[in-house]
Image (cartoon, rainbow, N blue to C red):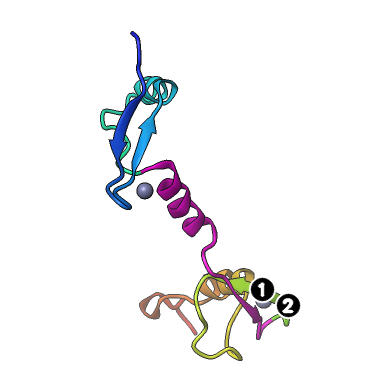
């Protein structure tokens, strides 16, 4: 099948962009039915946004290590690093699952 460059309009910035023959083939190979809705610029931007998810530096109250969390801690002095957070969750039994005799 022959592909030809197509001009599409970006639904985000409304700019025209070229959907190249090579890309169309790529889409077809991937089994994608819909042409891209956004120009490469906008696609790149949204990708960057995801990649640059804001991380907040914290000092873990448990191990004192510096860590990063993907949310803004409500109380910066009361945060756990991912490791300790996972541990604390693992160590905290659900309320109705206390082992007998405790
Ligand atoms: Zn765009
Ligand atoms: Zn920690």
Secondary structure beneath dot 1 equals strand
Q: Is mark 2 within 8 Å of ligand 2?
A: yes
45 magenta-colored = yes
Left or right relative to 24: residue 77:
right
Left or right relative to 45: residue 37:
left
32 or 81, nearer to the observer: 32
The quadrant where residue 76 appears: bottom right
Question: At 48% from the left edge and 59% from the top edge, which residue is drawn?
Answer: 49
81 magenta-colored = no
Secondary structure beneath dot 2 equals loop
Give the labeled residue for mark 1.
Answer: 67
Task: Residue 68 in the image: state x and y as whole percent.
Answer: 62, 72
The quadrant where residue 82 appears: bottom right
Task: Residue 31 in the image: state x and y as whole percent.
Answer: 33, 24
**Mark 1 crowd level (few <14, some 14–19, many ≥20, 10 Å Cα):** some
Say if 82 sits above or below 4 in the image.
below
Question: At 31% from the left edge and 44% from the top edge, which residue is drawn?
Answer: 10
The part of the chain drawn in magenta is 39-62
91 or 34, nearer to the observer: 34
Task: Residue 1 in the image: state x and y as whole percent.
Answer: 33, 8
Q: CA distance from mark 1 to mark 2?
A: 6 Å
Disc sitting over residue 65 in the figure: 2
Question: At 38% from the left edge and 32% from the top edge, which residue is drawn?
Answer: 18
Task: Residue 39 in the image: state x and y as whole percent.
Answer: 38, 42
Say if 76 sits above or below 27 in the image.
below
Say if 44 sits above or below 81 in the image.
above
Left or right relative to 59: residue 30:
left
Disc 1, disc 2: CB below 8 Å? Answer: yes
Q: Is mark 1 within 8 Å of ligand 2?
A: yes
79 or 84, nearer to the observer: 79
């Amino acid at each position: 099948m022959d592909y030809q460059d197509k001009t599409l309009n970006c639904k985000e910035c409304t700019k025209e962009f070229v959907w190249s023959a090579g890309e169309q083939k790529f889409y077809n190979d991937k089994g994608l039915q819909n042409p891209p809705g956004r120009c490469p610029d906008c696609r790149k931007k949204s990708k960057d946004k995801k990649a640059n998810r804001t991380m907040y530096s914290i000092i873990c109250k448990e191990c004192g290590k510096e860590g990063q969390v993907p949310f803004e801690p409500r109380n910066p002095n009361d945060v756990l690093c991912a490791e300790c957070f996972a541990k604390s969750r693992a160590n905290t039994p659900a309320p109705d699952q206390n082992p007998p005799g405790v």
